[in-house]
Image: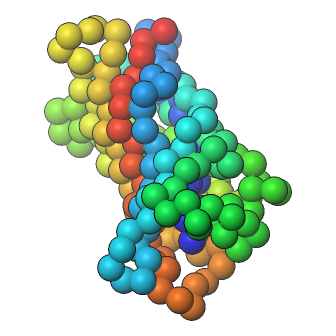
Amino acid sequence: MYSAAVMLGLSTVSFCGAASAAVWTLTPQSQISFKIKSLGLSQVKGDFHHFQSKLRFDPEAPNKGRVELQLEASSVTFSSPELKNLILGSDYFFVEKYKKVKFISTSIQAQAYQHYSVKGNLTIRGVTQPVVFDTKLIPNAENPKLMDVHSKAVINRTAFGMKKSLGGVGEKVHIELKGQWNKQ
């Protein structure tokens, strides 16, 4: 139900590219989250708190970049805490067996100025599916060692082996990364 979002948001991110590409990691203040509709009206939000990330990226050659993201599935907190055991249980994330959510990019394509399509493979519950993240990477005006990021995608949770829901839990999971990459 919510594991698809976790899958996305909660893996290690790494961009690997040309030898001149800079290496970046997400700042601790960055947020990896997911949202899913429940009962048609309300939304449940999950935020991952423990993740590893790495980005190799050169804006002059984005197609040579690479991202890897790994999330600790059990580090997620929820806007509705009473759902934690259900979502982390065997019907959804099954964190007892699948501890990590991973994303590894396969390509980065420039779409417009500071706007990229990041394609890759997302693994949740041991199931890997292709995902495309709509991503903005913007140099920070105040600190040249920081790059602002806003990335989002939508996945179908049952494609990752999560239980089909009979009681109004949505199929689509909205994944979002907001924060900053810090140049190493």
Task: Tell me: 34 left or right of 110.
Answer: right
Q: Residue at x 46, y 58 (%)?
A: 79
Looking at the image, residue 34 lies above or below residue 49: below
Look at the image and name its color scheme: rainbow
> Splitting the image into 4 quarters, where does residue 40 fall?
bottom left
Nearest the eye: 92 or 121 = 92
**Residue pushed farthest right?**
97
The reply to whether residue 68 is in sight is: no
**Residue pushed farthest front?**
82
Q: Residue at x 40, y 23 (%)?
A: 181
Q: Quadrant of the N terminus?
A: bottom right
Task: Tell me: 149 left or right of 65.
Answer: left
The reply to whether residue 54 is in sight is: yes
* Residue 180: percent from left, percent from top: 36, 26
Q: Residue at x 68, y 48 (%)?
A: 74
Task: Tell me: 118 left or right of 12.
Answer: left
* Residue 115: percent from left, percent from top: 24, 38
* Residue 82: percent from left, percent from top: 58, 66
Count every numbered label the image shows and give the total. Answer: 0
* Residue 138: percent from left, percent from top: 24, 26
Task: Tell me: 147 left or right of 81.
Answer: left
